[in-house]
Amino acid sequence: MFMWIIPVAVLYGFNHNVFPGSSDLSPHSLTLWSGLLAVISVNAVIGFYIYLAMKEPSDKHEPDPAFLAQARASVQKPIESTEGPSQPREKDE
């Protein structure tokens, strides 16, 4: 949600002279600075999200045993059909 709110707020702030000094900029500079700061704010939100994910303890999460058993069974299951989308077929005209 913050990835949408913060950049839009930055763009709104620059375009409506909320930030001090933004009224002194030319329209071209205003567009460049507001876009640049919006992109930087999105990257800051992504960095904060990664920081929180790395800070989370890894021993807290354990996979579901039923899901693991089903995944192992599906990997070990042999392929039954040799004809599929990757096999070449003759073209009917």
Image (cartoon, grey):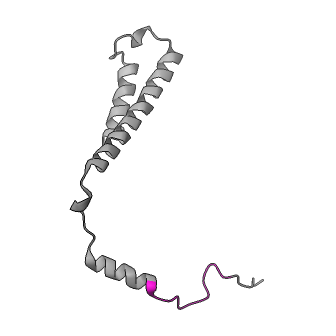
Instruction: Give the image location of residue 85, x and y in percent.
Output: 61, 79
Horizontal side of 80 relative to 73 (left or right) equals right
At x 42% / y 83%, what residue is drawn? 74
Depicted 9 relative to depicted 18: above or below: below
Highlighted magenta segment, given as a residue range? 76-87
- Residue 8 occupies quadrant: top left
Outermost residue to the left: 60
**Residue for point 38% across, 32% down:** 41
The percent coordinates of residue 15 (x first, y second) are 40, 20
Residue 56 appears at what percent x and percent y? 25, 51
- Residue sitting at 33 percent across and 29 percent down? 9
Quadrant location, the C terminus: bottom right
In the image, is 14 to the left or to the right of 31?
Answer: left
Residue 10, by quadrant, is top left
Question: Is 66 situated above or below 15?
Answer: below
Q: Is 91 displayed left or right of 13 in the figure?
A: right
Q: Nearer the viewer, residue 90 or 59?
A: 59
Q: Where does the image place residue 13, in percent across and percent down from the top left?
A: 35, 22
Q: In percent of the image, x 30 and y 50: which residue is there? A: 53
